[in-house]
Amino acid sequence: MVEFSVTLTPQNSLKCKTIDFKLVVKSNETVSNPSSEFVIGRNRECEIKDTRISRQHAKIELRPSNSSANCHGLHFVNVGRHPCLVRDEAVKPNQAVSLCPGDKIGLLPDEFIYEIHFTVNFGTEEEVQTVKPETKLQSPVSSSKNSLSLKSEAATEFKAKEASMKINNMTTSPTVQVHTSENCGKFRKRDCTSLNDYFKSSPTKIRSNDYAKKTKVSLENESESNKPSDGRVKTSVTKFALSGSWHSIGTRTQCGFYYKPALPTTLSSFTGLKIAGFDLDGTLITTKSGKKFPVNDDDWRLLFNEKIKNKLQQLVSGGFIIAIFTNQNGIQSGKGTIEGFKLKCTSIMTLLQIEGFIFVSTMKDIYRKPRLGCWDHMVSLIAESLADAGKGLPSDCELLDLKSCLFVGDAAGRPANAKSGRSKDFKCTDRLFAINAGIPFFTPEEFFMSQKEEKFIMPEFNPNKVVESASSVLPENCLPIKTSEIVMLVGYPGSGKSTLSKIFESHNYNIVSRDKLGSIEKCQQLFQSYLNKNSSNDNPTMRILIDNTNPDKASRAKFISVAAAKLKNIPVRCLVLDSTEEHCLHNEMYRILAKTDHKPLPYLAYVRYKKSYEKPTTEEGFSEVVHVPFVPNFDSEESKKLYCMYLLER
């Protein structure tokens, strides 16, 4: 009979408590029984109450080793629906991995992390004794038995059970050896995956690998007789573990999250840092399933295999800081989870064997590409790291060397390529992100495969050019007058009607605004009351402005006909704001980003306006139709800088 005494020690949360349990298996058992497994979950034994942990989240169980059905090893089995972590590597649902003393087990990416330690006890089925480090125990059967250590007795027992395994001369494995009282202090770290390994390891406590550092395990050369049957030769394997941590970003927890690596604390010669930025999907990875979108968090592979890994490692060696920026709509819409995506990113970075920033935007806010919220946040984190280390920058030095920075992405605005079979790029977002940041841009094919630059199509609306070419003042015929008149505004939502109406309101115009009143009926009632009030005066000076979209003749006639019936001599001037739909959508996004209290408009409002729009003419009853140009007005340089960026995902 073999007994494992297991202890799970919490590492990073007050919600976790130490868990102690025992697993027992008979020496001739080849299948699991209730006493050879322990369920970790939201239950009394584990004292976990967090609803993110299922009642049966994972199991610790004894399983037969690969070498012998009679030799069991401790395994972690994910029985939940979401990935777990063992040794900082993802364990998929229904997957089992072997455990060693000191391994870290994570039920969630950032919480409920335990360190496992265990001792192996063995004996007859009626009696079990514990092997204590460097302590010789007398045989429990008879006092007349020789005073042999229980360790040596167990080794003899295993030698008898597994005659094919020549333990004493180490022909079974080149990395393990039998430890007796003479050599028990001379052993090395090793991965113990079965009970056989525990007996051949030192009786002292096996030290765990450092959870936050790279470790390297060298496998000694095997003889020809011990090579695997498939002809493979064991080589050195490098284990890589990330040393950073995950954080939320934005004013709301759903805004996004990012991974922060260990940051530099010095600048060589103060020449500026170099950032190598990358999109994720379609740039570094693609789907294993071949589908356009991943079916789950495990549906990924490197886009260009080893070329991507080698290129990124070259960049790190060249002094670049790696940063990944990705928009993930699926998380916000419920098609994925934050925990699952964190595990996915951890697996990707571990495979690439690099450290770097990972920024994940889940909402349509300032942190979403092509907007620079995540980029600016990254720059501030780097600056804070230098400041904390007492390494301030000289006054004449920039933190980043923008000319040496770069960004790589597949959303580049390229039309379909018949020769390569590549379909049209769905957007131009990544290229616009690089333009906003002021850094060079490359497609994955250009950067990783050294292909020539392809043609691309930029959005028609360029905010920077619009601001540069815009007039600083409104034309005279677009301004208020001192005599009586009725002014009707016509334009898209976000075209600047509200801003223009404030100018007229400051000149004592009565404003009829649907944004304030809520319905067209209330607007008509207020307009009628203004007409009645002024018509009862013998010498009125009546000035009214109608602040609605007023796209078609029918909506405009509701006001023009009433005005003509009441006051025939009062002119009605039509001011048409000429901003295009794309320009107005840009204005709307700017208002969302710049004003925390602004309520976003649905895109349907723009669709309805465009569909119902009829060009205003004087035949409708207007005294004149004036087209109002775009005149920008910013309260600060920061506001202007934000407006001049590409803000829309195009």
Image (cartoon, rainbow, N blue to C red):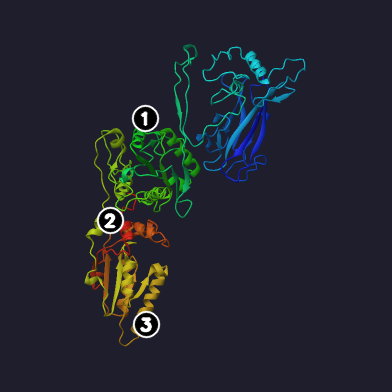
Amino acid carrying label 2: it is: Pro
Q: 310 or 187: nearer the eye? A: 187
Mark 2–mark 1 distance (CA, rounded to whole Å): 40 Å
Residue 385: percent from the left, percent from the top?
41, 48
With respect to residue 370, does 313 lie above or below? above
Residue 473: percent from the left, percent from the top?
24, 68
Which residue is depicted at the point 40% across and 57% down? 602
Check residue 74 in the rendering and tell me which mark sits there, or answer none.
Answer: none
Amino acid carrying label 1: it is: Glu
Q: 352 or 506: nearer the eye? A: 352
Q: Nearer the viewer, mark 1 or mark 3?
A: 1
Q: Quadrant of the N terminus?
A: top right
- For residue 543, what is the image quadrant? bottom left
Residue hosting label 2 = 463
Residue hosting label 1 = 306
Mark 1–mark 3 distance (CA, rounded to whole Å): 79 Å
